[in-house]
Amino acid sequence: MKQSEDNFKILKRYLRVYIKMATNSFVVWLARRSAFIIFLIGKIVRYSFYFGFLIFLVKSTNGFAGYTGNQILFFTATYVLIDTLAQFLFRSVYSFRQLVVSGDLDLVLVKPINPLFRSLFGGADPVDLITLPAIIFVVVYALTYLTTYYILHTTCHQRFSYFSLFSYCSLITGHNNYGN
Amino acid sequence: MGKYLKVLGISFQQEFAYKLNFIMWRVRNVMQVLVFFFLWSSVFQNPDANYFGYNKEKIIAYAFLLIFVRAITMSSRSVDVAGIISNGELSNLLLKPINFFKYWITRDISSKFLNIIFSFVEITFLFLILKPEIFIQTNFINIMLFVASLLIASLIFFSIAMLTSFVPFWIPEISWGAQFLVIVIFVEFLSGAFFPLDVFPTLVQNILKFTPFPYLVFVPIQTYLGSQNIHLNLLSLGIGAMWAVILLFITKMVWQKGLKVYEAVGR
């Protein structure tokens, strides 16, 4: 009982720290409004190109590799969602190299918090947060076209597997970025 | 001339300073081409299929040419200019008895030279592994036009890299933002480096022909593949050359205006 209470306290402390770090990150971004707008436009254009290309391709080929157009859209949208979610949560890994090279990692190591947590979750990205709803919409939109198929052919276990793998892939993507 | 040869030599050695970094950059390029290769291989599962004016041989040739064309046109050190403007390091360069543009063109040449060597190794390696049926151009005129289009593409990319790098003269905090938007997004998608532009509807393709982007990757590859007749190839080359001249002129003008507002922040 005592152990679980301690764990809960630690979890609460880390959540408070995360909220603080995320708020700081958002404030930094808002202070650089022009950069914020450029990156936001860039991400929107990039996703528009991704999906535009797929739609043109699928329309001309009527699907490929055994997948229908909607399945391809759902597949790609899921990938983009995982990638964006991972980048939103783990954006600060991009600056990790700089921390090591400049010696600023010392400042992270002396703080009473897990340095890996600080390095991974240190800077939530509001640009990704803004684009996330649109990507979720595309996933749901593609899913609604597949719904009939899924209700008829998938089990609860398979649906649960999708969401589990989705969460797992987000973590893997984040850690891959960490390796870079 | 001697000093630029020295710059070329030093720059070439600098490329080897962070070997793993360079190797990972090449791995990234190969991965992009592999994605392209496997995606289009699955689209062309039926060997007799013909989509967007390509058969399987030509689309595979497009994938392999991407490695080579990207190595020539898109490998560049001039993208570093944005960083040296925003942190004030540009002052060091301005004090040297060296022409700014010649210096960066020389550094670009060194980067391209190294990337071309690696691209040949990668193409050979992938060719041996994947054993694709590939289209080989035998027409000498097409090959010469292809070489000319690569030269024009390199000049266009140099100008675009420079123009986006000059943004920090006015907005120092956007050293990477402008390059992300223009080079990573627009150049990558609209040049044909991500997919052949024939995928787009005709109207979009016609609009794109009036922009400099297709002349970076798509037009050189089309020229090699001989997808158009000689007159259209020459016309494309002419438009590309016109874009190169216009962009170089604008680059020079923006540079002169930028120097007037340069404050050497941090120095």
Image (cartoon, coloured by chain):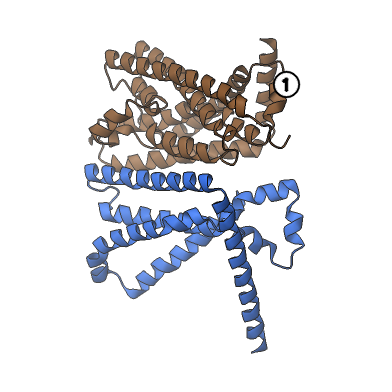
Question: Residue A53 at what x, y percent from top left?
Answer: 32, 42
Residue found at the very far bottom of the displayed protein: A1
Q: Sort mark 1 into few (<14), some (14-19) or many (20+) by Cα contacts within 10 Å.
A: few
> Which chain is in brown here?
B
Indicate whether B193 appears above or below A36.
above
Outermost residue to the front? B261
Question: Quarter holding the C terminus of chain B?
Answer: top right
Q: Nearer the viewer, residue B68 or B203?
A: B203
Q: Position of residue A103 (x, y in %)?
A: 76, 50
User: Of residues B148 and B242, which is closer to you in this image?
Assistant: B242
Q: Is residue B151 above or below residue B68?
A: above
Quadrant for the N terminus of chain B in the image? top right
Q: Disc 1: which chain?
A: B
Residue A118 in the image: state x and y as whole percent: 65, 61
Disc count in the image?
Answer: 1
Q: Describe residue B237's horizontal placement relative to residue B45 as left or right.
A: right
The residue that appears at 50% across and 33% down in the rendered structure is B125
- Position of A108 compared to B147: left or right? right
Residue at 65 percent across and 76 percent down: it is A10
Chain A's shade in the image?
blue
> Quick check: can you spot residue B138?
no
Q: Which structural element holds mark 1?
A: loop
Vertical side of B62 occupied by B96: above or below: above
Asked which quadrant contains residue A153, the reply is bottom left
The residue under label 1 is which amino acid type?
A: Leu
Disc 1: which residue: B95
Q: How far from the left and from the top, in percent, is residue A88?
A: 51, 57
The answer to which image quadrant residue A174 occupies is bottom right
Residue in view at x 63 percent, y 50 percent = A95
Instruction: Residue at 70% x, 33% y: name it.
Output: B17
